[in-house]
Image (tube, rainbow, N blue to C red):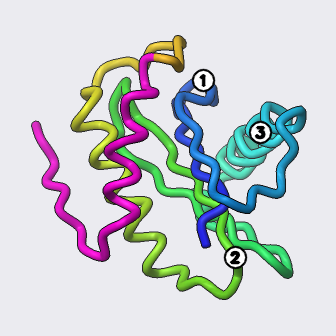
C-alpha cells in the first residue's frame, strides 16, 4: 500500500505536491522535517559523487526516488510504501507520476506556491487506480 507520495522541486528541494495514503505514519508536524531530510540526504549523496539515491528501506517500508527531467523544471518523485509491495511495479508508477506531472505543468521552473499543483490530485488518483502506464511525454 502506498503511504505517501512527495513531489519536490529538484533544485530547491521544496515540496510541490503531497499525497497521503490511508495509513500514513508521518505526523503532520514532521512532514517538513521529513522532506528536508530527504532533500539533504540526496544532496549529500550527490556531493560525495556516489550517484543518485534511488531507494531507502527500513524493516517496514521502502522509499523510492524517481528523478524526472534534467532542465530547470526537474522534479523528484518520492514514494513511501509497505515492504510487501513490489518495488519494480511502484518504481514504474513513480515514473508515470513524474511524466504526468511534467506534462500537466510543463518543463519550466516550478512555482513555489504549492497550491498551484493541487489540481494534480485527481490525475494522480487515476494513475494509482490503473495497472497500466498511459503517459506519453510531451515536448
Upstream in the sequence, badge 2 or badge 3?
3
The span from disc 2 to disc 3 (Cα, nearest Å) is: 23 Å
Q: Are marks 1 and 3 in contact (CB under 8 Å)?
A: no
Q: Is residue 7 visible?
A: yes
Q: Residue at x 83, y 50 (%)?
A: 26
Q: Is residue 31 left or right of residue 114?
A: right
Instruction: Tell whether position 129 is magenta.
Output: yes
Q: Residue at x 73, y 67 (%)?
A: 56
Considering depth in this image, is 96 or 39 the residue closer to the camera? 96
Which structural element holds mark 2?
Answer: strand
Residue tagged 1: 12
Q: Is residue 139 above or below residue 50?
A: above
Q: Nearer the viewer, mark 2 or mark 1?
A: 2
Q: Is residue 131 above or below residue 94?
A: below
Q: Residue at x 60, y 23 (%)?
A: 12
x and y percent of residue 35 in the render?
74, 39
The span from disc 2 to disc 1 (Cα, nearest Å) is: 28 Å
Question: What is the span of residues highlighted in magenta in the rendered image?
Answer: 116-139
Q: Nearer the viewer, mark 2 or mark 3?
A: 2
Considering depth in this image, is 129 or 87 the residue closer to the camera? 129
Residue tagged 3: 40
Which structural element holds mark 3?
Answer: helix
The span from disc 1 to disc 3 (Cα, nearest Å) is: 10 Å
Which structural element holds mark 1?
Answer: loop
Q: Is residue 59 above or below residue 74?
A: below
x and y percent of residue 2 in the render?
60, 65
Upstream in the sequence, badge 1 or badge 3?
1
Q: Residue at x 17, y 62 (%)?
A: 134
Q: Is residue 52 left or right of residue 99?
A: right
Residue tagged 2: 82
Q: Which mark is residue 68?
A: none
Amino acid at each position: 500500500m502506498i503511504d505517501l507520495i512527495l513531489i519536490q522541486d529538484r533544485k530547491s528541494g521544496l515540496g510541490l505536491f503531497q499525497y497521503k495514503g490511508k495509513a500514513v505514519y508521518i505526523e503532520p508536524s514532521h512532514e517538513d522535517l521529513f522532506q528536508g531530510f530527504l532533500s539533504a540526504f540526496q544532496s549529500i549523496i550527490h556531493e560525495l559523487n556516489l550517484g543518485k539515491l534511488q531507494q531507502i528501506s527500513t524493516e517496514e517500508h521502502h522509499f523510492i526516488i524517481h528523478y524526472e527531467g534534467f532542465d530547470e523544471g526537474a522534479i523528484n518523485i518520492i514514494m513511501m510504501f509497505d515492504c510487501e509491495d513490489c518495488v519494480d511495479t511502484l518504481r514504474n508508477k513513480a515514473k508515470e507520476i513524474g511524466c504526468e506531472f511534467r506534462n500537466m505543468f510543463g518543463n519550466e521552473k516550478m512555482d513555489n506556491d504549492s497550491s498551484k499543483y493541487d489540481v494534480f490530485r485527481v490525475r494522480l488518483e487515476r494513475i494509482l487506480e490503473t495497472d497500466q502506464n498511459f503517459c506519453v511525454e510531451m515536448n
